[in-house]
Image (tube, coloured by chain):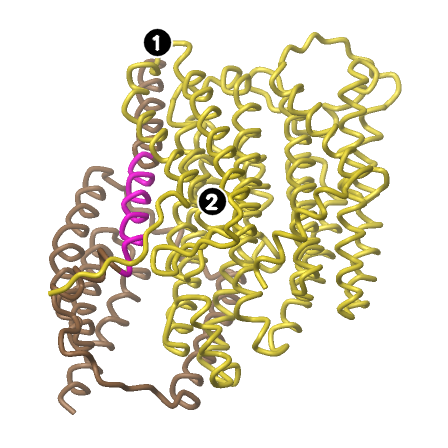
Amino acid sequence: MIEMIIFYPTAAIVILFSLMVVLHKSPIRSALFLLGTLFFMAFIFALLSAHFVAVIQILVYAGGIIVLILFAIMLLNLQKEDSEYDHISLGKVISLGLGGFLFLIISIVFFKMYPGHSSELPANFGTIEEVGRLMVTDYVFAFEAISLLIIASLVGGVVLVRGLINSKSKLKKLK
Amino acid sequence: MEIVMPDVQLLALAPEIILIIVAFLMLLFSPLLGGENTKSGPKVGGIVSLIALTAAFVINLLIGQNGQSEIITFGGMIAKDSFSLYFNALVIIAAAFSIIISFDYIDKFGIKEGEYYLLILFSTVGMMLMGSSTDLLSIFISLEIMSIPIYVLVGFSRNNLRAREASFKYFILGAVSTGIFVYGAALVYGSAGSTNLAAIADALLAKPLYNDPIFMLGSAFLISGFLFKISAVPFHMWTPDVYEGANLPITAFMSVGVKAAALSAFIRFIVYDLAITGDSWVLALSLVAVATMVLGNSAALAQSNLKRLFAYSSIAHVGYIIIALIAATESAIASVLFYLLIYIVTNLGIFAFLIYFSKKENECESIDQLAGLGYSHPIMAVCMGIFLFSLAGIPPTGGFMGKLFLFIAAVESGYVTLVVIAVIASGVSVYYYLKVMMSLFEKGKKTEENIKNPYAALVVFIAAIITIYLGVMPGFFIELAKRCALSLF
């Protein structure tokens, strides 16, 4: 019962905040709403007995990644472009309709047809020990492959940004 | 606490590991060789990665010769069977040829960063892992290792606005499709209790999960994620724009490598899991196949930009392949493997041809630029003719054999209507392939030019020879494809 009391408000807040991330015009405020979304997601992880993941969620995402995003937005120094978002096009209406239809299907499946599973959790579920053990045993491939993925995206990010800086300095030389 | 490591056989992953090590060494040493002021930097990287790819290819063959039919390692996340070795060989060939055709191209287009080849290597590793993945988690991670370098490679030309737009578009749409894929994986996990494809199959056999709405929804999302990567209608929107915006060698790499890799994981998912859930998904995939063939071929008719034309043509070819996926029998999967080999060789040949005729900072991408080239460069034009005939499915080229086996396999499984539509669609496709051919031999536009690009010419010749060889003597490769398909069942 207490879980329900925590879950529904948290879920509502997460949905509201993530909608605001997309809909808000100012990038900084969007980033702050994202912070809120990720912070309250940690509550849901905690409700699922994944305490370690919940703590990591707050430390890494809310603490680290959002700060990076905020820095990036401030450094880019974006100008306000209100006019782009104002008009309603046919494409937007159609995508909203299709998205709503998909949402309807998913909600019918979850609320009407899904019987729901529940089973006993093992005693050490969600502890640091257990997560660490899984990471180097059952999921060792995923663990190693993700490190490769991070290197690859790091290199990719550097390549893209370096191109940007080079072309900007070339423009300055031309001026 | 006791820690029990799963059975890890690193030797089975030796081809991937070699590529990763070489990529890391290049990452460390390329600043010494590359840069603004050195000329040889990227080229050294290209040669090193070619050597690494050759080594990976040889080791891949050795693992295949080993006699051990199947190596399952990393707790069931990775399987090295003949099927994955076949796909590994395909993507290594695709990467190697893409690197060879890049040599002259990147000089002409002023690309100096050594990371160009590095990112191709990373992406190749992702593709190879994808062919070997037997777990939704490892499929997802290798999908990302494959895609993220491709997003960057598409936008590699720093001053090309079109390339940047294409890269951004591909990135956003790719991220959404990956999100859908992960959501699907989560739903399937919730329903079947495991992310391992074999374990999901066991769960499906134990109780009829295909009536479970959660499993249906999850597998629909997974299928959508795969269909996006192989650019089937209705998830094809990005294909023409991205193929047009990217540099030609990257377009070549994407049009063959990404498709082959995504198909390898898709085939595994279909054969392991979907095939035992009855025919609940057959109607949906049939509609996708018909839409893909019809839209791909009819949109290609109107194109005058060659990159867009071949983008739509590649969409149409995915449509033919999906028919065989629906059949999902041994012979159908074997025909897909054979078809993909021909498709890869032919497409690489076509893009090598376009690179051969690209001038400095000006890609050969309009159909008018080909006018009269048949008279000034007859040999190249004949090779291009072979490729176009192969794509259209006219004997004695490989494309004919590929389509023949594909359609026979589909008819055997009783999908006659689909095959009839496919034959009509490929009849329509002859028109736009011949349009390119006509332009090559247009009278009165004789242009004498001295073009020196031995790398692209080499790839064109090799591809033309293989295409003809596969059309005349397909026996060995069909047997190979059959043996590799057999290892899935």
Viewer-side label of 1, 2: 2
Report the chain shown in brown: A
Distance between the alpha carbons at the discs numbered 1 and 2 = 35 Å
Residue B118 image position (x, y, % from top left): 39, 30
Q: Are marks 1 and 2 on the same chain?
A: yes
Report the chain shown in yellow: B
Residue B290 image position (x, y, % from top left): 72, 62
Of the numbered discs 1 and 2, the one sitting upstream in the chain is 1
Badge 1 is on which residue?
B37
Residue at position x 81%, y 68% from top? B417
Asked where in the image residue B191 lies, by quadrant, the reply is bottom left
Q: Which residue type does callout 1 highlight?
A: Asn
Badge 2 is on which residue?
B128
Q: What is the chain letter for disc 2?
A: B
- Report the quarter where the N terminus of chain B lies: bottom left
Q: What is the chain letter for disc 1?
A: B
Residue at position x 41%, y 62% from top? B136
Q: Which residues are magenta?
A: A138-155
Q: Is residue B12 among the parts visible in the rendering?
A: yes
Residue A76 image position (x, y, % from top left): 24, 38
Residue at position x 77%, y 50% from top? B403
Q: Main secondary structure of the magenta part?
A: helix
Residue A162 image position (x, y, % from top left): 31, 27
Assign a secondary structure to mark 1: loop
Whether A149 is among the magenta residues is yes
Count of residue discs: 2
Disc 1 packing (10 Å; few <14; some 14–19; many ≥20): few
Return the residue nearer the eye: B9 or B160: B9
Q: Which residue type does callout 2 highlight?
A: Met
